Amino acid sequence: MNKEYKNGLVSVIIPVYNVSEYLSRCLNSVINQSYKNLEIILVDDGSTDDSYTICKKYEEEDSRIRVFHKENGGAASARKLGLLNACGDYIAMIDADDWIHPDYFNVLVNIQKKSGSQITICQYQTCTDLSETFVDVDANQNIEYKVTNSLHECMEDSYVRSYIWGRIYTRDVIGSKLPQEGIVMGEDTLFNILVMCSYQDISVSIVDMKLYYYYMRDTSVIHTVPYADMIYVSGWLIDNIALFCSSEAKREVIKRCMKIILYYAYYQSIGRKGDDKKRLLSISDRQFKQIKPYLKKYLDIKMFVLYTLLYNILPLYRLLRIIEDRSLLVWEKDIKRKRKVGENDI
């Protein structure tokens, strides 16, 4: 699709699914931004409550809002539709049950212009009620931020790597890349890896302010999907390793995949024996066989030997993890108890 991208315009993409209780708070926080040059793309993902009606009401009242409606397909498919229709120089994703500070875009756009970074991120505040507590921000003050120009550092930073909200992307860093459908947990991580590892000389700025308000609710997707689904992120990356052109990008993707594979094997081994354990570990076994040739090709011999040793001797991996964090012993005990009585161990 050929579009004329508009200078300074921020395309705000909000996937909407059964969030009528929270949606107005989110939309009010966006339309009342001090930075006015916005296009607000609401994608109703087949809601069965009043969410779509609320979206249409806001569309009638604010010319910057466009509403799309589709059959339910998940947040990734909704964001994909939003991206395909976005016309801004900047792209932002916001979850419909979250909200943002009134100066959110003003700060992030100004910092992006100063730093030249492709991704500009703020800190976030986790909220468990409906209160709106904003810190005072003067967008014209000397706001502190740090710039990371290392792909390795970006990939190792869990916040930079794992979330699609709390940030703006420049149009050029996203290019034609789209969220991948069908991955319930880790879709944000996968998108960020695709974006960062496909761009030459990635730069990320991190603003030391909590300007994004993440609402923690019992039915949030992050609470209701199994951690095991992260293994499908590494599976997708291994199958599509050719998408990453530089050797540096391939190395970072391979190391990230190995960390997922190792953790998955360790996690699924806790308190399990026999056929049940063998069945679950067959997934990581298959991925390790797939990735082994890439380990040889792109990592040095020490890293190749280390990853091979850790995967083939999982108790060694477990020992190193526990030395680093002894609280895992308590966590393991709880996992074993839950699995023994058939409880959900997420």
Image: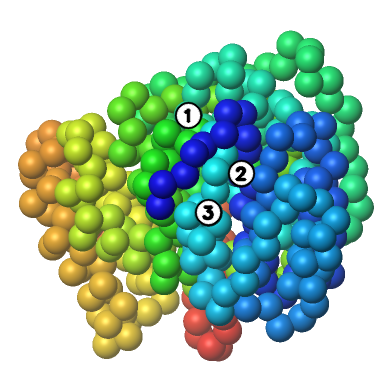
> Which residue is pictured at 57% across the width and 39% down the height?
88
The label number, if any, that marks residue 85 in the structure image = 3
Asked whether 143 or 279 is in front, the reply is 143
Type of the residue with mark 3: Asn
- Where does residue 122 sit, x and y in percent of width and height? 65, 33
Number of marks = 3
Residue at point 39% right, 28% down? Answer: 202
- Read off the residue under disc 1: 118
Left or right position of 211 against 323: right
Q: Which mark is residue 11?
A: 2
Rendering coords of residue 21 (x, y %): 84, 70
Colour scheme shown: rainbow
Earlier sequence position, callout 2 versus callout 1: 2
Look at the numbered discs 2 and 1 and tell me whether their residues touch, using CB distance below 8 Å: no
136 vs 143: above or below: below
Q: Nearer the viewer, residue 81 or 100?
A: 81
Q: Is residue 245 left or right of residue 89?
A: left
How far separated are the C-alphas under marks 3 and 1? 20 Å
| Residue 259 vertical position relative to residue 187 in the rendered view, above or below | above
